[in-house]
Amino acid sequence: PGGRTVTMAFTAPSTGTYHLAFRDSDVGVYLSPGGIGPFAYTLSPAVAAPLDQRVDGGISASREAGLYAVAGKADRPLTVSVFWGVADEGQLPPLDGRLRVFGPDGSLLNVPSRESAYAYTETRYTGIGHGNYPVRIFGHYSTLTEFILPFDGTYFVEVSDANQGTGNYWLGIADPMEHFQPLSTTQPTVTEFGVPGDGQEYQFIAAAGQALGWAYQGVHAIQGWAITDSGGVTVASGPGGRTVTMAFTAPSTGTYHLAFRDSDVGVYLSPGGIGPFAYTLYVMPTVQNMTINDGSAQRSKVNSITLMFSTLVTIDPGAFDLIKVGGGPVGLVVSTSDVDGKTMVVITFRGAGITGGSLEDGNYTLTTHREKVHDRATPHQALAADRVDQFFRFFGDVDGDRDVDNLDYFALRNAYGKVIGQAAYLWYLDVDGDGIIGAADLAEFNKRRNKRLKP
């Protein structure tokens, strides 16, 4: 359609020469020679929109407009925010702003209304009476919030003065397209939303069973968050806010995506309301690995468990529980040390059922409680999630396959009669830890020979 401020847009179906035509429509009543002409106009070409960053723009001459091209995709959200300036209550700012959005075919899709809200009060002389009086100042703005794009193509955002006047504006266009950037799983990410409604998309690699987490803290709240796998399937999600924990345990090894969006869209009382808005993603500490004894496969004896954390942490009392399946809790001795910027925890055992420093035969579950392990640099950051590790002990099982068979017997036969310090001595076949593999150890071995420990 026509008018005094018109956006003319299209998407070329093929490469070639095209023609644009329009005609003056103000024909009819002439009250002076100037009514016969000439009549100036301006064609302002669209420019590529600076996305996810505040545009400090302006209309410096009558009949100008700002026209911004935005690449979009069907079903993706478009958020546009404009601050027009401030004015006394009941008045308009210098720019009588108008925001319009057009589709790839030039059709008008949306005309967000201009709103106003109280910003502050200043005291000044108003020209009425004597002395200064308080004057209420209002901010004026327009917002298009998460407009769902109907199809793929280039969209156009038009910023103009409704009466073809001049003035400044502050514009923010959130990129409707996804752009994934690497996310650190070891260091904090300090960054910002560029404009209201800005979507943040990250990607990272996780191993199967790996627990990862980030704590969001920002000036603006987020709507919510979701972690998806490489196929787009959501594997974890949660609500938004200004302080948010985002955590999950990877179901399989692969690349994952974390996405969330700024939610503070709506009322703008200054240019700063258009952005940027800082936030930080703090990496939550995790258990990087759990090692039984020295890491060897044998489960003939289990004398220690070693946990290596991803960073330096503080361990609260009661951080670990070890339960024998079908039995009860095991007494623990917890020792910590710092190794290359990480905390290492070594757990040994005490109390009934502990012989030669080892747990008794059976299946066990070790739980590391998230709320009792804290990042030393940022104590409010706890573990991303509880960690649960399962393992077993079965005396005589040299290769860790849950049974005591001939392969295990050959190992015992070679070690039989050896004492600590000799090359063939195997500490994990010394059931009572007396420094010699003798008759008592053979007797305990034979009790389990040709038997299997059920999971």
Image (cartoon, grey):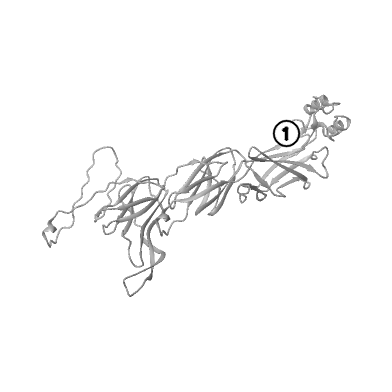
- Residue at 14 percent across and 60 percent down: it is 28
On the rendered structure, is 231 left or right of 29? right
**Residue that badge 1 annotates:** 294
Report the number of discs.
1
The residue sitting at 82% across, 41% down in the picture is: 354
Q: Choose top left, top right, bottom left or bottom right for residue 432.
A: top right
**Front-most of 411 and 200?**
200
Q: Position of residue 90 (x, y in %)?
A: 34, 67
Quadrant location of the N terminus? bottom left
**Residue 129 occupies quadrant:** bottom left
Q: Residues within 10 Å of mark 1 (few under 14, many from 20)?
A: few
Residue 235, compared with residue 441, is above or below; it is below
Picture coordinates of residue 2, whole percent (x, y): 24, 54
Closer-to-camera residue (332/235): 332
Q: Is residue 375 left or right of residue 360?
A: left
* Extreme residue in the bottom direction: 129
| Callout 1 amino acid | Asp
Local secondary structure at mark 1 = loop
Q: Position of residue 49 (x, y in %)?
A: 36, 46
Q: Is residue 381 above or below residue 346?
A: below
Residue 25, picture quadrant? bottom left
Furthest residue toward left: 33
